[in-house]
Each structure stands twice: as structure tokens, then as C-alpha cells.
Amino acid sequence: MPGSILRVILGFLLLLFLLTLGCAGPTVSGVGLRAEAISLNDKGYHYYRQGRLEIAQEKFSQALKYNRLIDHRGGIAANLNNLGAIAQELGRLDEALNYFHNALAIYRELGDTAGLCETKNNLGAVYQSQGRTGEAQAAYREALGYVQAMPPGPLLALTLTHLGDMARAQKEYTQAWDYYSQALELDKARKDRQGQAVRWERLGRTLVEQGNYLGALPYLHDALWEFRQQEDTGGIADTLNSLTRLALAQGDRESAKLYGERLLKLYQARGQEQEAEKLAKMLKTGK
């Protein structure tokens, strides 16, 4: 008899627990999944800036899973953009395009102007890497159209920088300088030190390509210092690349080797094997 009573009591307590879980479960789980997705995305971005790309990819993928579970469309699109950025860094350009196109479709569905602008910038960067100049230019122009309807901010600075990259690739240096300078003024207004470092590196690179090596050095040194402070490994890599090119252009093989070896180790640590191969070739040929 006591055993039967105990089983009844335990059964009742179990039923009460299940009923409580059933009532509270959906709301708590929904909030929890969204909060966890945001936390994972933030961690992923932190690891991405540090160049720990595999860990960042893992965090973004888990965030994407959680956002899919609760059908959070904006979160899904953001995660797709982030995964595309990692694929692009690793040289998997077709994979990156797939992520960006899927993100773009969701942002169009939502009518999210900021998301559309960011994704068009991402697509333009991949097209440019693939040598698809016309498509890259069109993507950046569309991004500019979206961002012009928004208050000035980081997305405008990003878009201006990409337009500057396109102008510089076409050796239209005056126009490139103008785009980068406009972006830099936006950074200064927002006291965005990382943004300023990006623009300093671009301005320095422009001067290198124009043969103004002495003028380029202060910009590149300031950019490298700030990127180190921010622990932005992508920015450090870009600046070391520009410094390597500057040394090669000056015929300073010793400095080029010093910068290049540091950059090579950085590419390897980030898992950017294709970039490491390009660098090794550049150091060997001097171009």
C-alpha cells in the first residue's frame, strides 16, 4: 500500500511538472532561442575580427540554426551574411555568393533597407574579386541608392569605401581619394577609430599605387597601430600587405621580406591559404 501511494504521488508530481513545462515551455524557449542566437552572433563577430574564422563560422552556424527554429527572418539573413563573409575570407567565393543571394532575398521580403545595402556591398566585393567589374559597380551603385535614404553612418562609409576600391582598381585615383576621404569624415564625426583605420589603410594604398611612398607611410603606420589596438586581424593583414607592396615598389627587398613573412604567418593563422599562396608568389617575383 505505501508503495502504491508513493507511485501515485510521484505520478501526480510528474504530471504537474509536465503540465507546467507545457504551459511555460513555448514562451520561455522562444525568448531563450532568440537571445542565444544574438549572443552566438555577437561571439561569432568577435572571433571573426580576431581572425579565428573556424570558431566564428561555428558560432554563426549555430545562431542560424536557432533563428531558423523560431523563423526569425532578420536574424537568419544576418547570419547568412556573416557566413558569406567568412566564406569570402577563405576564398570560397561561389559559396559566399550563395549565402549573400539568400540573405538578399530575405531582406527584400522584409523591405529592410539597411540589410539590402549591406548585402549589396557584400555581393559587390565578391564580384570584384572575381573580376566581374560591371556587376560589382552595379551592386555598389544599388547599395548607394539604398543608403542615401538613410541617415549618414557606417553603411554610407562602407559603400563609399567600396566605390573608392572600384575607382582605385580602374586607376581613377582622384575619385578614389575623394570617396575614401568622405568616408573618413563620417568616421571622424562618429569617433569610429576602427573605421578611420580602414580609411587610412585605403588612402595609404592609393598613395602607394601612385608612387607617393613617403606620403603613404604615415597613413599605413597609423592604420596598423589602430588595427592592433582593435585586435582586427583582417585590418592588420590588409595593412601589412600594403606595406609589403610599398617596400617592393621601393626596391627594398629586406623590408618587403620582413613585412611579408609576418603577413604570411598571419594568413596561415587565419586559414587563408589562397592569400598565402598569392603572397609567396608576390615575394618571389617582386610584383
Image (cartoon, grey):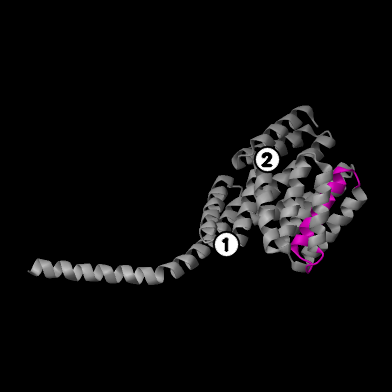
Q: Which residue in the structure is indicated by mark 2?
A: 94
> Visible in this render: residue 22?
yes
Tell me what residue is drawn at x 91 percent, y 47 percent: 172
Stretch in magenta: 148-172
In the rendered view, would you say 131 is above or below 124? above
- Where does residue 260 sit, x and y in percent of width and height? 71, 37
Residue 53, disc:
none
The quadrant the N terminus occupies is bottom left
Residue holding disc 1: 72
Residue at the limit of the structure toward the top, as seen here: 285
Compared with 223, 153 (above or below) is below
For the image, the number of numbered tags is 2
Q: Is residue 177 left or right of residue 271?
A: right
Residue 268, horizontal then vertical, whole percent: 62, 38
Closer to the N terminus: mark 2 or mark 1? 1
- Report the side of 280 relative to 32 (left or right): right
Q: Is residue 86 left or right of residue 155?
A: left
* Element type where label 2 sits in the image: helix
Q: What is the x, y in percent for residue 49?
A: 63, 52
User: Which SS does the magenta portion mostly show?
Assistant: helix
Residue 75 image-quadrant placement: bottom right
